[in-house]
Amino acid sequence: MKGMHNKLLSADLSVQSSAESTIDAEKLTGYLGGRGLGVKLFTSLVNPRTDPLSPDNCLVFATGPLTGSIVPTSGRFSLVTKSPLTGLILYSNTGGSVGPALKSTGYDCLVVRGRLDEPCYMLVSEGEEPQIIPCRDLWGLDTLETQNRLESLGLGRFHSLMIGPAGENGVLYASIMNDGNHRAFGRGGSGAVMGAKNLKAIVIKVGKAKPDIDNPELLTTYVKSARDKMKVAPITNSSLPMFGTAGLLNVINELGMLGIKNFQVGYSHEAENLSGEAIREQIFEKDEGCYACPIRCGRMTKTQSMNGKGPEFESLLLGTLTSIFDLVTVTEANYHCNLLGLDTVSTAGTISCAMELREKGALNDDRIQFGNKDILIPLIEDIAYRRGIGEELASGSAQLAAKHGMPDAAVHVKGMELPAYDPRGAIGHALGYATSNRGGCHLTGYLVSMEVFAAPKKIPRASTGSKADLLVLKQHQSAIEDSLIVCKFAGYALGFDFYSRFATAVTGEDLNITRLMKIGERIYNLERLFNVKAGLSRKDDTLPKRFLTEPLSEGLSKGRTVPLDSMLEDYYRLRDWDKTGAPSRAKLEELHIKP
Amino acid sequence: MTIDEETFRIFQRVGKEVLMRNLGSSHSGNISIRSGGKIIIKKRAAMLGWLEPEDLIECTLDKEDSSSLLASTELGVHRAIYQQTDAMAVVHTHSPYSVVLSLIEDEITCIDAEGMFMYKKIPVVELNVPSGSSEAAEKVPPILKNYPACVIRSHGVFAKGITLEDALQNATGVEFSAQIRYLTMLTGKPLKRDYSKEKDFGNW
Ligand code: SF4
């Protein structure tokens, strides 16, 4: 398929060997690239019952046909592995420039399996065998120190992926950072998978390889038009460039659906202290963007004692969930998470769960209290190094709350802590949380884009009508965005028809919207099938009890709970999943998936 | 079957809007949504501008059912659009300017700013029997795989959307672009600047 090199590089750390192979045309046309191709390769390599931290688990890094092209926001690439946090399939993608660098080596995908007995990093270069290089001296360094050390090695121009101490120490929600602390494969604990392989970093030297593009002229026409649209759409031309993702905070707080105090509350007048506006006024240095992105939503910031990137909207949970509305503390906590290699969402959700346990008398540690800003950064360090109470927190909120006899204090779906939108405020989005294939994730369906941000159109956030239908559509669209790959934020300006046009011009295949949606459905069902084989069933498609039974007590979402059951009925019927939660045989046949 | 109040209100609002914008005669046009894996559509002979709750009917999406006794005559086209595209809602109107241009052009190239931003060009489909035919169910969906709306020559607009309001916006947007293009033609004067040529909409 054009737009890809059709080449895969596999490395086995246990035997220190590597191999190059051709990717079947069928896999590419059936799954595109990125998340889709990653899921297809991963599910054929890894047994669903595999221990995620064993050498048998694989890390599949996959670019898509648009990665590294002239399409706006096409700097992204995907990772698929088995999550140690959920025990389910994990798909994740990251921006920056690492994806285009991988593509420039002449490979579309990199598969890493096995485990080396000592810390190592991998060096991938165009036209050369990958090298697996022992690096005891890098082990223990934070992500920025690691990047600096790699830069001092005289490797030429490169981009990199690395873990921090949290990944080395097997924290179940450790992230993989790229280019120091630039961007992240944030969620689900991929950093712990890399750590369990003793793989500290992957260094990708920038090469010259470029895949064929079927119709470069047409692609240029489409790209010009897309850029025109992005220049005039309000979210992509002013809100995100001006305030970054943190610009969402005031909007969500005003609607009374911001995750506050471990989701006990949906609105706080103090939340404004952490808003995009506050960041702009108090700590902003300059904006920053991923490869080929005109939006540039990243914020480079500084406090009196530190500087770094962020915080993003979701990372502000470090303050809202813990009721610590102090911008400097939250910003520095976010810097620490990036340096230590921790997912900020799960870190915030686990710490706030501990705070609720303490509040309800189930945890005996007086320091761990909502609003105690002095405890936040020390706790983050304890988690990364598994010190003291950090040892318990390193396994995530579900295990922590269960251990202390109060499972409902953990706000998670399938073991993954929830992002910032309180689902009682947008109930289609709530169904998305309950049915996401990777657990508590807002990006798998992202129906809040319609329910709150009216993109592409507004739908009522409190009604159930057509929500299951719309969610299924959005889940398939999302799988396609993650497979081509483009950033979700481009969708605030571009309709899905643009992705179809880009994909067709690049690959030369007739990738009309209908065909793309079928591919999205195939990806979604293959992920689901893997999860069912890993032990997931219908009872797992649910939400924390508080969202189903405890109405929000103040703000514009006051009085609301999530009527999940009726939407879930519709959802299962639309998906043709059986009572156990598995895709029906007929559905699998229709999608050409082997049961 | 029960159609919830909120869904009915949206149908009522969109139907009224079609009437007020003069996008057809008193009884022409039809609108539908995909919901719960089924289609909710206006009934045959119901007036789009004056919908009552019982003017809507739920029909199966994947095959024919007895609801076709009462549903809009264009149910077959709506069903085929849902089966073959990503449409979540469909609005069909007999919009006059779009119909006029469809009689003299093979595609409507937008020259107004909004139309250029939203559609660029709108395909025209020719059928042997322009209204209520199975030919429409065959020829309209493949076009709506790639475009938000098209015009059946001498008949009217089929527009899809992610919501009913979205489909309405596409139907009214197409008509607005057609109107501007038609009025510009009436002046008989050349365009000072044709942005559609600069932006290469012929390739769209
Ligand atoms: S919008 Fe932000 S996250 Fe998305 S590609 Fe651009 S800079 Fe990266």
Image (cartoon, coloured by chain):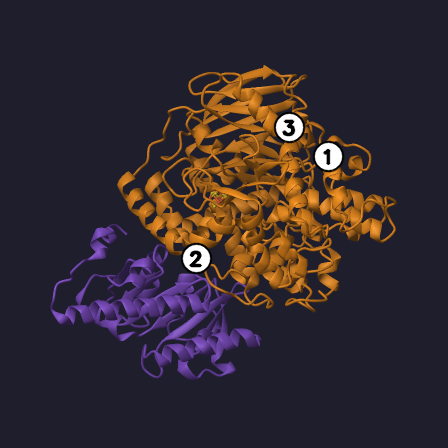
Q: Which residue in the protein does label 3 denote?
A: A142
Answer yes or no: are tags 2 and 1 on the same subunit: yes
Q: Are marks 1 and 3 in contact (CB under 8 Å)?
A: no
Question: What is the x, y in percent for residue B149?
Answer: 34, 63
Side of B101 relative to A320 (left or right): left
Task: Report x, y in % for residue A272.
Answer: 62, 57
As helix, strand or loop, the secondary structure at mark 3 comes to loop
In front here: A279 or A214? A279
Instruction: Say above or below: A483 vs A105.
Output: below
Q: Which residue is mark 1?
A: A381
Q: Label 2 CB, ligand 1: below 8 Å?
A: no
Left or right: residue A347 versus residue A504 is right
Q: Amino acid at mark 1?
A: Glu
Give the residue type at disc 3: Asp
Quadrant in the rendering for residue B5 = bottom right
Q: Is residue B131 above or below residue A361?
A: below
Amino acid type assigned to the residue bearing label 2 in the image: Pro
Q: Chain of mark 2?
A: A
Q: Is mark 3 within 8 Å of ligand 1?
A: no
State whether residue A570 appears in this view.
Answer: no
Res A234 label: 2
Percent coordinates x, y for residue A278 in the rendering = 58, 52
Q: Colour of chain B?
A: purple
Q: Colour of chain A?
A: orange
Q: CA distance from mark 1 to mark 3?
A: 11 Å
